[in-house]
Amino acid sequence: MSKVSQSASNANGSSTTNSSDIYNIVLLVVDIVVLIVKFWLAIVESIVGLFQTKPQDNVNGKFVLITGTGHGMGKQMALQYAALGATVICWDVNEQTNNQTVKDIKQKGGKAFGYVCNVTKREELMELAQKVRKEHGFIHVVVNNAGIMPCHPLLEHTENEIRLMYDINVVSHFWMIQSFLPDMVERNEGSIVALSSCAGLFGLINLVPYCGTKFAVRGYMAALTEELRQKNPQNNVKLTTIYPYMIDTGLCKNPRYRFPSLFQLISPDVAAASIIQAQREGLEEAAIPRSYLTLEKVGRLIPRKAMRLVNDFVDTGVDTDKY
Ligand SMILES: NC(=O)c1ccc[n+]([C@@H]2O[C@H](COP(=O)([O-])OP(=O)(O)OC[C@H]3O[C@@H](n4cnc5c(N)ncnc54)[C@H](O)[C@@H]3O)[C@@H](O)[C@H]2O)c1
Ligand SMILES: *[C@@H]1O[C@H](CO)[C@@H](O)[C@H](O)[C@H]1NC(C)=O
Ligand SMILES: *[C@@H]1O[C@H](CO)[C@@H](O)[C@H](O)[C@H]1NC(C)=O
């Protein structure tokens, strides 16, 4: 590419075709042929990949940091990573529940350390990150999990609610990444997981700002993936975005379904296992259940009006938490 543009600027108005022009055309043709071959190889590879079980990274003896470990999926992930032999660094704003998680892990013979952290407080977060890196060394896996989900019509959301939601669900992730990514890039290993949501795939009523935060997570993770790849074509730092459907943690207060057998609440330990598997396989994206990502892709190909008919028929979502 650069050679082609170079020759264009070198062309000093002479009308004779010189050998360097021919050389550049040959280069371009070679580039195109290589692209076509690699393109189809990549497609074949991913089709073959569908039928293979992916190898999972070993987390035994490694350090895993999770935010929001006091409850729900964060707690279950902490327990399961510890059971796999990882040392888990547990961050939560709730000291009591976080202590309980650490205690539960230790009781089962696992290794864990608990720290109180309100992830909205940037200074505190960055300081704690420094302390953790000093005390424990390299953190292999960082899971941005802490999140809140106020659920009512947009016009009933207060300013504080909206700002706090963005601070926890999105903005805190940037401080976490700025704290822990540099070590990962330097060693060219490690993994960052972010909890988006099916609310980051579909627009849902009563969740207008929440959907905004979860689409934001999806967007910045996609962009960061490209940034890492461009900086180092051999990049081995893995980014994984997770899109859970409704999980039975209490976060989602009033789920509504027309066909409960089709859209059952998933238990937090099953969801945690699914997240850990996606991280260890190095998947870029994973929904829980996995098929929801395909559902979203197919749904986008179908005209909106037709898709809405299906949505209305299925009639599944969350009702306001105000009653
Ligand atoms: N439960 C669901 O149905 C569902 C679905 C899709 C995505 N998610 C996402 O998964 C993540 C975990 O959800 P969950 O259902 O396990 O939540 P949860 O409410 O069960 O637990 C969240 C934990 O985060 C902690 N936390 C809240 N604010 C914090 C702060 N400012 N600083 C530090 N910690 C804080 C809480 O104390 C709590 O221990 C969230 O990001 C959520 O948006 C959940
Ligand atoms: C949590 O554990 C720490 C360290 O073990 C302890 O200092 C603190 O008092 C505990 N907090 C609560 C609320 O139990
Ligand atoms: C975390 O800090 C924010 C302000 O940055 C505050 O509004 C919020 O209530 C705090 N969360 C908890 C649980 O203390």
Image (tube, rainbow, N blue to C red):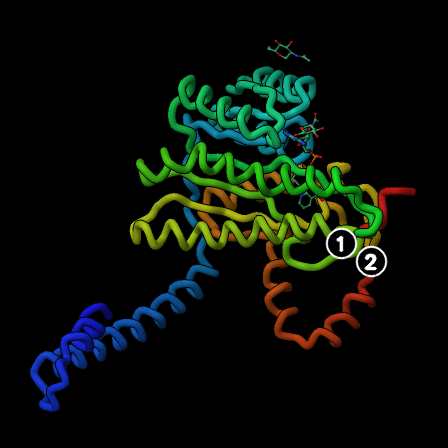
Q: Secondary structure at mark 1?
A: loop
Residue 37 visible in the snapshot: yes
Q: Residue furthest left?
A: 19
Residue 83 visible in the snapshot: no
Using the image as rendered, state which of residue 184 and residue 286 is in the foreground. Answer: 184
Q: Is 9 situated left or right of 133 in this image?
A: left
Q: What residue type is disc 1 on?
A: Phe
Q: Residue furthest right?
A: 323
- Residue beneath label 1, please? 263
Quadrant in the picture for the C terminus:
top right
Q: Secondary structure at mark 2?
A: loop
Q: Residue furthest bottom?
A: 15
- Residue beneath label 2, please? 259
Residue 276 drawn at (x, y percent): 53, 40
Using the image as rendered, state which of residue 61 and residue 205 is in the foreground. Answer: 205
Residue 307 quadrant:
bottom right
Q: Which mark is residue 173?
A: none
| Whether residue 136 is situated above or below residue 3 in the rendered picture | above
| Label 1 near ligand 1 (CB < 8 Å) | no
Are the two marked residues, 1 and 2, in contact with CB atoms closer than 8 angstroms?
yes
Give the residue at x 46% y 42%.
280
Using the image as rendered, state which of residue 25 and residue 261 is in the foreground. Answer: 25
Q: Quadrant of ligand 2?
A: top right
Residue 131 drawn at (x, y percent): 46, 19
Give the residue at x 24% y 73%.
31
Q: What residue type is disc 2 on?
A: Phe
| Whether residue 260 is situated above or below residue 23 in the rendered picture | above
Give the residue at x 79% y 42%.
158
Quadrant in the picture for the N terminus:
bottom left
Marks 1 and 2 sit apart, C-alpha to C-alpha, by: 7 Å
Residue 287 drawn at (x, y percent): 60, 52
